[in-house]
Amino acid sequence: MIAGPCSAESPEQLEGLFRALAPLGVHLFRAGIWKPRTRPGSFEGMGEIALGWLQELKKEFSMPVAVEVGEPKHVDLALKYGVDVIWIGARTTVNPFLVQQLADALRGTPVPVMVKNPVNPDLNLWLGAIERFEQAAISDLAAIHRGFSLYHNPTQYRNTPHWSVPVELKRIRPDLPLFHDPSHIAGKRDKIAELAQKAMDMGFDGLMIETHDDPDNALSDGPCMLPVNQLADLIRRAQDVRSALT
Ligand code: PEP
Ligand code: MN
């Protein structure tokens, strides 16, 4: 279970969330430091200063942290501040030049990398990004399914899940842990639990869910972040079919 805010906003916000998530059994704390916004003018993240906050809090609460990197400079800073896991965002996975630069920046480091699907439903682009990290000797890799954007979206979600794409990825690469991110698919808070349960029923290996102490006043992705009490409910109610069957 990976959880945390869309964006790191302040040391107080992060501390409150670490305090709330630690007893829920969350394994990895996520927070966006540099936000890839579709259009300029939105909140673009706190940047380096927030890496310092995360470094302090991860020690205090003994919870590892994950951030998104979008350019080699982000990789250097994330490594400098002891980030435990790095993820590649959907808008980065689409760009093989950038993915190669990130893979080169990470070459020779033991840090695990999670690769989100590209915004368009192109399995080869997703696989290609994963392979670029493998070729840079990054052996601890995972994939994250966060849905696909469509111009005429017939679904009730912000991004269509296109479940067949992650299923095919799992068929081709059963060795690769596959996570589900219902927050960026749902776009709305009330759809998150059903997506998370479906992913678990389908045998996904884990979940990445956005949460916030005050989602309605968040600086990014407020509508799709769960308040902490709703995340706690989701974790309590979630049924792991595999453990129920064994
Ligand atoms: C995020 O995880 O906050 C994010 C920007 O996600 P995505 O790359 O899936 O849009
Ligand atoms: Mn987000």
Image (spheres, rainbow, N blue to C red):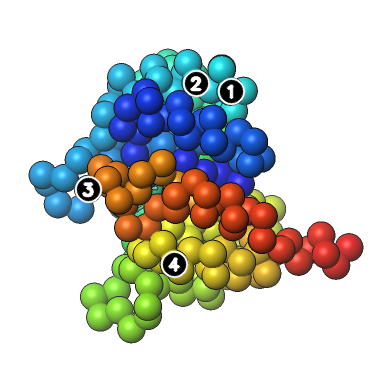
- Which residue position is annotated with label 1? 61
- Image quarter (top left, top right, bottom left or bottom right) of the C terminus: bottom right
Q: Is residue 42 above or below residue 198?
A: above
Q: CA distance from mark 4 to mark 3?
A: 23 Å
Q: Is mark 3 within 8 Å of ligand 1?
A: no
Kind of residue at disc 4:
Asp
- Which residue position is annotated with label 4? 190
Q: Residue at x 16, y 45 (%)?
A: 42
- Earlier along the polypeptide chain: callout 2 or callout 4? 2
Q: Secondary structure at mark 2?
A: helix
Q: Is residue 185 above or below residue 47?
A: below
Label disc, if present, on residue 37 of the rendered structure? 3
Label disc, if present, on residue 57 of the rendered structure? 2
Q: Position of residue 34 (x, y in %)?
A: 29, 35
Q: Position of residue 187 (x, y in %)?
A: 35, 63
Residue 22 visible here: yes
Q: Secondary structure at mark 1?
A: helix
Q: Nearer the viewer, mark 4 or mark 3?
A: 4
Kind of residue at disc 1:
Phe
Q: Residues within 10 Å of mark 4 (few under 14, many from 20)?
A: some
Toward the viewer: 92 or 67? 67
